Amino acid sequence: MIMAKAKTKKTIKSKPTRPSKVVKAKKPVKKSAAKPKAKPAPKKKAGYFLGIDLGGTNVKIGCFDSDMNLLGKTSVPTNIDMGPQYVVDQMGLAGKNLLSSAGLDIKDLAAIGIGTPGPADYKKGVIIKSANMPKFVDTPLRDMVSKALGNKPAILENDANVACWGEFTMGAGKNVNDMIFMTLGTGVGGGVVCNGRLVQGVSGNAAELGHVIIYPGGRLCNCGQRGCIEAYASASATAARAVEAVRAGGTDSSLKHILDKKGTLTSKDVYQQAAAGDALALQITEGTAEALAIMCVNMLHTTEPAQIVFTGGMIAAGEVLLQRIRHHFQQWVWKLKPENPEICFATLGEDTGIIGAASLARYSLLNNLI
Ligand SMILES: [Zn+2]
């Protein structure tokens, strides 16, 4: 299944607004035989949306109106060890409280979007097995959340795809139709928008970009395979490569002093020391930039995006890292014709997950997909 961007694009605002009236659909227009088939314009439905970002530590929930203005948001501890029903009950309670604080009632709720870590059977809305949520086994999460929130329509989607959709509809990708999205944290998540549609795959697990192999036989990845981009460019991998390099003899690096002091390194340490000119930190950063650039070249030849958007801890590295990615991109890309996709950072910040989930719920409802 693929999903297309809703036509409406508006700036996120925090100002609450009252429900808009149902806008009657226009009378059907006779199709011209000369014109290509077009999807009928979706009916506009009034209502409010909840965007839920289910993480291992916290559940973030945002309440949005039909123009995707943020009316309010909340965050509650996930308490993942308490099991699915407890988590869903807390989610339902927090969602209802959020609606109430926005002056709304459950009857005002139009649909719910939920982003969770993969893999899962997103088409069926079921978490089959999750490394982050061990008690969620064959859990019909989508339907459970729907039941906890007035049996409203709901959609379950991979959290990286949700973030991608948020950036595409409301953030960095607002003005493009083809976008690649990568989020660099403990792992590397990805999203692909092609021809204005979110690529989801057979069971909704498309765009696991972190596990694209860039160096066969290379570093061991969390997934069990070797040479995945995640094993080089995630925040954790960047930090791990720095620790290894220090232990392999980087004695005059400022990273060694930090490692000796803290007993560990983070990707932020690496990027900060690189910005300060530390040679070893620059070398590690260069390795991350090159790995990401190879990924960009591969994606260019897969979907020819107008824009490649990065987010996560690497944003702390700033423009310097982007410049190195662009440099290596030009090094590895073919020379048959100029290729200059915009390589940039995401703009929505910490609310990407709730914005994307709500935006996806709205799109899915408008297009009768839920
Ligand atoms: Zn992998």
Image (spheres, rainbow, N blue to C red):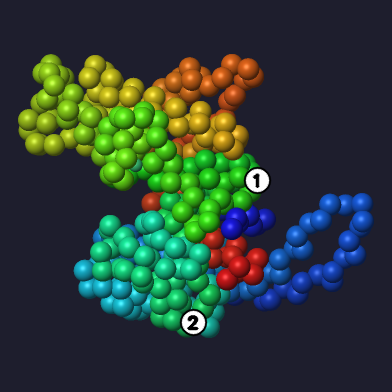
Question: From this viewpoint, is residue 345 visible?
Answer: yes
Apparent side of residue 330 relative to residue 128 in the rendered image (left or right) = right
Residue 293, quarter of picture: top left
Helix or strand or loop: what does disc 2 sit on? loop
Graded by Cα atoms within 10 Å as few (under 14), some (14 to 19) or many (20 or more), the crowding at tag 2 reads some
Circle 2 residue? 151
Residue at image position (46%, 68%) is 125
Label 1 or label 2, whichever comes before in sequence order? 2
Q: Position of residue 228 (x, y in %)?
A: 36, 36
Q: Residue at x 48, y 68 (%)?
A: 124
The quarter of the rendering in which ligand 1 is drawn is: top left
Residue 369 coordinates in the image, percent (x, y) = 61, 68
Q: Nearer the viewer, residue 48 or 78?
A: 78
Q: Looking at the rendered structure, which numbered label has been put on residue 354?
A: none
In the rendered image, the quadrant that contains the N terminus is: bottom right
Please state the horizontal and vertical placement of residue 245, each as a whole percent of the image.
18, 24
Instruction: Give the SS element for disc 1.
Output: loop
Q: Which is more toward the observer, 75 or 119?
A: 119
Mark 2: which amino acid? Asn
The residue sitting at 61% across, 45% down in the picture is 194
The quadrant in which the C terminus is found is: bottom right
Q: Is mark 2 within 8 Å of ligand 1?
A: no
Side (left or right) of 63 relative to 257: right
In the picture of the structure, the residue carrying the numbered disc 1 is 195
